[in-house]
Amino acid sequence: MDPKQTTASSSGGGFFASIASSLSNFGSAMSKSVNGPTGIEIEGLEVVNPEGGTEDAEEEAKKGRWKEEERDSYWKMMQKYVGSDITSMVTLPVIIFEPMTMIQKMAELMEYSYLLDMADETDDPYMRLVYASSFFISVYYAYQRTWKPFNPILGETYEMANHGGMSFIAEQVSHHPPMSAGHAENEHFTYDVTSKLKTKFLGNSVDVYPVGRTRVTLKRDGVTLDLVPPPTKVSNLIFGRTWIDSPGEMVLTNLTTGDKAVLYFQPCGWFGAGRYEVDGYVYNAAEEPKILITGKWNESLSYQVCDPEGEPLPGTELKEIWKVAEVPKKDKFQYTYFAHKLNSFDTAPKKLLASDSRLRPDRLALEKGDLSVSGHEKSSLEERQRAEKRNREAKNQKFVSRWFDLTEEVTPTPWGELEVYQYNGKYTEHRAGIDSSDCIEEPESRPEFNPWQFDNLEAE
């Protein structure tokens, strides 16, 4: 198969095509409907053992983090939402949460930001895409965690400093629909994202569609890169051990030159065949393959120069471009060392904003292992948010995001249109003013969590 077809096909191309096609039929074959809590088979309730076959489904259904009575009760509550977008319409118990918010996970992408530095420094336009696409693939190691992050409160922020010489700010800019915006910058690049997740609940699984726009501008040559990631499927939400897969294409386009990287995430097949594997090419503007990329998103990636047919050039060899950093052993939430830093005040700048995720009382309680307090604090924050909305609407006022401005641009994505938020530069000015001051901050002086824009909003 002509490797050029990768740019137009969802199943990949070149010498990786045979791998993709051989695995494409595995996903549906390895899942099986199982008996529900009443002993009656529930149509569409599929249990998938990623390390086994269809005969393992019944046994797999008995596993997972839920106690049997909690699992059955939760299923009875959730089955009415089958087919719905449940991004923000369902109140979930903290037993399935991790002590991190969605906007902190946006910052987690920055762990291997040195790859963007290298993309900016290289003179080779195709290696630029090798480095940059490796950066975007690297985050999938963290995304395989099956704990749910907290939904940010409207106006909640997350700041990060002391990493890669850059500043990072993210803000929850909309509650319905849930939308976040983020901006990162150092001497080599600027990174801007508007994110609006869309979901479809399927019973024992949920499809997650990354409705968003991600742009990276490399400062030396001024080129802009645009990302379209694959969708994600979370399996065994209620019955069985939860696991995550992201089969499909990731496309990273150099909007300045027309070059692009097209990488195919292989679907998980029988007994784990193909799981974690990612393969693809860097193409020039004429859609000719220049470099092949292959590896596993949970281990490492390598690249090799190829000929116009997509075959490795004689005399060349695979070279590793990225490798997962060492991770803690038996960590409760499967956190990396970098993930732990995201909750630490070591990565916080001076005079942290009171709206920062680190300060959330429900997140702090869960981090300490107190599920009862965490659940109570989560409910209190959610009711406070509803009270603020009622007060705001009663006064005919609108929430206005602080660090990002809503533009008039509406961009198409494979999963729907997206209203684009733009970084307004005010955080850079805010941070410069603080960093230039002589203030000394004591740990005890950290503020209470306060993302609210309106006063006198006690929950009714």
Image (cartoon, grey):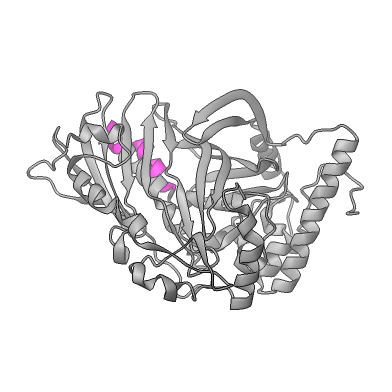
**Which percent across, then down, holds residue 143?**
47, 56
Residues rendered magenta in the picture: 113-128
Query: For residue 123, what is the image quadrant?
Result: top left
Residue 26 drawn at (x, y percent): 31, 56
Q: Position of residue 85 (x, y in %)?
A: 60, 46
Left or right: where 271 falls relative to 63? left
Q: Does the segment drawn in magenta span residue 356? A: no
Magenta stretch, main secondary structure class: helix
Residue at the image position 39 percent from the left and 27 percent from the top: 221
Number of labels in the image equals 0
Q: Which quarter of the image is occupied by the C terminus?
A: bottom right
The N terminus lies in quadrant: top left
Verify whether residue 117 appears in magenta: yes
Front-lying residue, 228 or 79: 79
Looking at the image, which residue sits at the far front? 40
Residue at 32% from the left image edge and 32% from the top image edge: 260
- Residue 291, by quadrant, is top left
10 or 366, which lies in front?
Answer: 10
Query: Taking 297 as reference, is 289 left or right?
Result: left
